[in-house]
Amino acid sequence: MTDTTAQDQVLIFDTTLRDGEQSPGATMSHAEKLEIAAMLDEMGVDIIEAGFPIASEGDFRAVSEIAANSKNSVICGLARANATDIDRCFEAVKHAARPRIHTFIGTSPLHRAIPNLSMDEMADLIHETVSHARNLTDNVQWSPMDATRTEHDYLCRVIEIAIKAGATTINIPDTVGYTAPRESADLIRMLIERVPGADEIVFATHCHNDLGMATANALAAVEAGARQIECTINGLGERAGNTALEEVVMALKVRNDIMPFKTGIDTTKIMQISRRVASVSGFPVQFNKAIVGKNAFAHESGIHQDGMLKNAETFEIMRPTDIGLSDTNLVMGKHSGRAALRAKLNDLGYEPGDNQLKDIFVRFKALADRKKEVYDEDLIALMQDTQTGEASDRVQVKFLRVICGTEAPQSADLTLTVDGVDQQVTATGDGPVDATFNAIKSIFPTKARLELYQVHAVTEGTDAQATVSVRLVEDGKIATGQSADTDTVVASAKAYVNALNRLEVRREKTGSDKKEVSYKDL
Ligand code: KIV
Ligand code: ZN
């Protein structure tokens, strides 16, 4: 057994960079994947599933570099049930101090029909592929995909084969989010009782959230004996997503009285990584999302506020500081100095270098001139605006004035600096943002398709900053640009230009982000 766990320790396996990133539209850049992996490692995630190395050159490179940079976490890659996938996976994860190969095949009747294998043929393939993986590393995870819809006798049979072939972790995926808590627990209990060798390995639970039960199903599996939870930050993932890391970790912490299991997660890092994943994936967190939603610790109604002032426990089962939110929302203004800004940013979990602080300070002062009070959320938006990942600065917005009103068409007068040269144009459109985007395209033509345009008010009030996300797609390459400004149209222009710059970087790179295969292609 490779990951020996104390009775009450639950291993946290994060698959934000594989199952999460595989969801349409959530593609992250190489630099962003490395950054998220470093944050996961730092917060105490036991196993990071860093990608699916056979899927594309980009995935392979990301898994290899994450493996090489990992400090504490086991680095895992996904592989289908064939030697080519498994070899490619090992080529990438072998750079880690503690590599893991995760290989899988769909075992339910519906999934068995896809490669058209008989039960016996599939059993032989499982033996062969798990043995192959085990010959490369002693840390092998095997998953019977769609386990929750697989016949119990067959599930027991193939798990026994995988254990005998050398699997050290057996993951039980609820691939389509079909199970319910009692059934999830019964399944794990049944497997532990019936499968020879079950006490030699770690059982994992991997739940999708199609019926909104992923967290409950994962916790039920743990109570029945699973000792690894597979999850993603913000519950990111295809369709309704995966079990949310922050939910299971905080549930085990807050209700430790009835679920006496510990994890190695530093929960004070949760908020920062949640914001970063939302930002780089372009998937915002819903306001009322458990643990990390904007309203999760907001007490709006009079009766709640009164209770909170007398005793926070009246309406709060955990403290904001438990997940890394600052206790006091100390408002900054135009008289705040650089030292105060640094202290505040540190408090919010950022550690800007001297040059980055210089840049942020200039932008903070400009914002404070336009906006009386600068809140934590404003500073977070500024920080995210400077963390634009791997963007070039070929194109920059120099000047923008829009004319809008009840009479169409609206027009935008725009100057862009392209490769150091100013270019000016006036364009019209159906609304100020459309006019602005048309102006950008007429100066810097692109065949990229606009796949997402999203605006969020950072704080309340009419002087609030807007954060805008723009996602562009060109030949399978996806780039998400973001920007924040008190003027929504300016933020939109900058976000669009940021996405164009990021696309430039991707175009220049050898290798593609485009997945040549998906884990669903067998
Ligand atoms: O949901 C699923 O079944 C998966 C497997 C590849 C483990 O993600
Ligand atoms: Zn999955």
Image: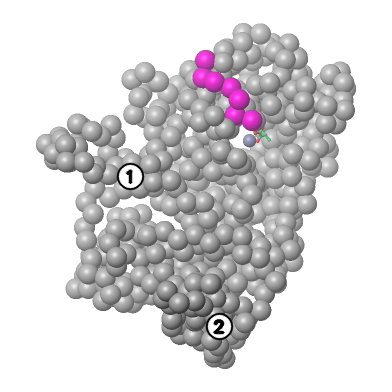
Closer-to-camera residue (53/69): 53
Residue 199 spot, x, y in % from top left? 61, 15
- Assign a secondary structure to mark 2: strand
Q: Quadrant of residue 117?
A: top right
Q: On the picture, is 372 further left or further right than 295?
A: left
Q: On the picture, is 275 further left or further right than 107?
A: left
- Ligand 1 is found in which quarter of the picture? top right
The image quadrant where one finds the C terminus is top right
Instruction: Residue under label 1, please give it.
Output: 295
Whether residue 356 is visible to the viewer of this picture, yes or no, is no
Q: On the picture, is 119 further left or further right than 481?
A: right
- Residue at left offset 41%, top offset 69%: 488
Residue 421 spot, x, y in % from top left? 57, 91
| Identity, as a three-letter code, of the amino acid under mark 2 | Ala
Q: Is residue 181 in the magenta section?
A: yes
Instruction: Residue under label 2, please give it.
Output: 427
Whether residue 16 is visible to the viewer of this picture, yes or no, is yes
Q: On the picture, is 411 further left or further right than 348?
A: right
**As drawn, 427 above or below 58:** below
Among the two numbered marks 2 and 1 on one chain, the one whose residue lies closer to the N terminus: 1
